[in-house]
Amino acid sequence: RLSKKILVVAGDGIGPEIVAEAIKVLNALQADGAIDVTLEDALVGGAAYDAVGNPLPEETLVKARASDAVLLGAVGGPQWESLHISKRPERGLLGLRAELGLFANLRPAVLYPQLAAASTLKPEIVAGLDIMIVRELTGDIYFGQPRGVETLPSGERRGINTMVYTESEVERICRVAFDIAMKRGKKVCSVDKANVLECTEMWREVATKTAAEYPEISLSHMYVDNAAMQLVRAPKQFDVMVTGNIFGDILSDCAAMLTGSIGMLPSASLNEKGQGMYEPIHGSAPDIAGRGVANPLATILSVGMMLRYSLDAPEAADRIDAAVFKVLDQGLRTADIMSEGMRQVGTAEMGDAVVAALAGE
Ligand code: NAD
Ligand code: IPM
Ligand code: MN
């Protein structure tokens, strides 16, 4: 078997701290022969801007294109907020997504039973929760034209962003959602704002038409405002949710809290060639960066998704999931998922515990 190439882009804030723990996990699996990977580093985000004046250096893009998978920490931070939008760290991330064509963003929200007490919702509301949010990632208001800020003749400024989807973009993300649902509960809820926005009215039509090819799938539709409410009211009604870029961004942070913490939610972003980028759904958490307290589990679980979706190593992925389950069973908790009677640990101690659990210790 050929060695697979992984590009590691740690980014900013807690990015390097959480990625270091994910690398420990990769190295442990490599050492016991479960996987054969070669790691390379590159700069992205504010770190790249500080080093070379560009949040997405050409070299990073070249390396990303040549790799089987990309592992990303997080980007952004207050020190880069006043830069021109084209230089901001977030552009590095958005540029990677766009340039690699990573249109399908999978964000599974799963409640580990051990964390029922960490959720801000009642245990009976979240027990057994297992939702897959399928977020379109390369279209919508994130990339639509026209955009920008213009000055009107009156001297007042006008800000513009445009929500745009083509039928083929909607169809391909719906197919991803339907294919995933076929391996799960066969229920898909498409989330839109078809009562107000023409773009998403078309989304609904295309979703319905595409679903006709999947007779076993039961497709429902929901407006995004109701979907946000339903996620908090009765989240277990959902199996797979499919939605556009901006609604998916917001709904996945909301769903994260059902699992106890945003520090638990991994993601995979896939293109049509099966290449993927893997990252926690959370950001660079400037408020806790540099203190060694961030939860590395979302990033470690993202490595699991990488092994499953891009590196053809499902057994190793299962081992990561089982190791995370075991450390939670052992009562280890980072601050964000801490609850009474548990043992609070830092970022590195949590990573070490996952590695030990992988080794069967
Ligand atoms: P954030 O996700 O960084 O943080 C939100 C809150 O969650 C903070 O209180 C933070 O401490 C906490 N949190 C996040 N991850 C955690 C973890 N692993 N363990 C424990 N607590 C964690 O969102 P924000 O504060 O809105 O954004 C901060 C910066 O991150 C901004 O520059 C933003 O653009 C960027 N961002 C980047 C990504 C990404 O790289 N994919 C995603 C979201 C936000
Ligand atoms: C995410 C983030 C990004 C997004 C930002 C940092 C560009 O919030 O990955 O969820 O909005 O997609
Ligand atoms: Mn987000």
Image: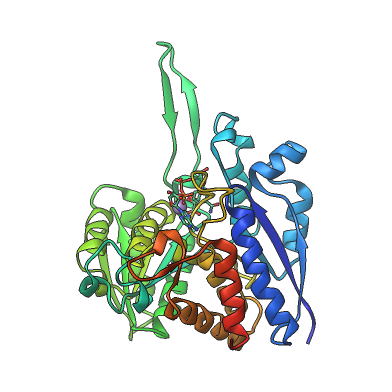
- Way the structure is coloured: rainbow
Q: Where is residue 186? Give x, y as percent.
A: 34, 82
Residue 167 visible within the image? no
Q: Is residue 218 above or below residue 344?
A: below
Q: Where is residue 44? Give x, y as percent.
A: 68, 49
Q: Is residue 181 above or below residue 250?
A: below
Residue plotted at (60% across, 38% down): 88
Q: Nearer the viewer, residue 69 or 37?
A: 37
Q: Which part of the image, by quadrant, shows the C terminus?
A: bottom right
Residue plotted at (64% across, 36% down): 87
Name the side, left or right, on which 125 lies relative to 174.
left
Name the side, left or right, on which 337 lies relative to 96.
left
Q: Nearer the viewer, residue 352 or 204?
A: 352
Residue plotted at (54% across, 49% down): 284
Q: Where is residue 97? Give x, y as percent.
A: 60, 56
Task: Tally the numbered discs.
Answer: 0
Residue 171 visible within the image? yes
Residue that protrudes farthest toward the top in the picture: 154
Q: Which part of the image, by quadrant, shows the N terminus?
A: bottom right
Q: Where is residue 145? Give x, y as percent.
A: 50, 40
Q: Is residue 150 above or below residue 295?
A: above
Figure quadrant of residue 231: bottom left
Name the side, left or right, on which 331 lies relative to 200.
right
Figure quadrant of residue 5: bottom right
Figure quadrant of residue 351: bottom right
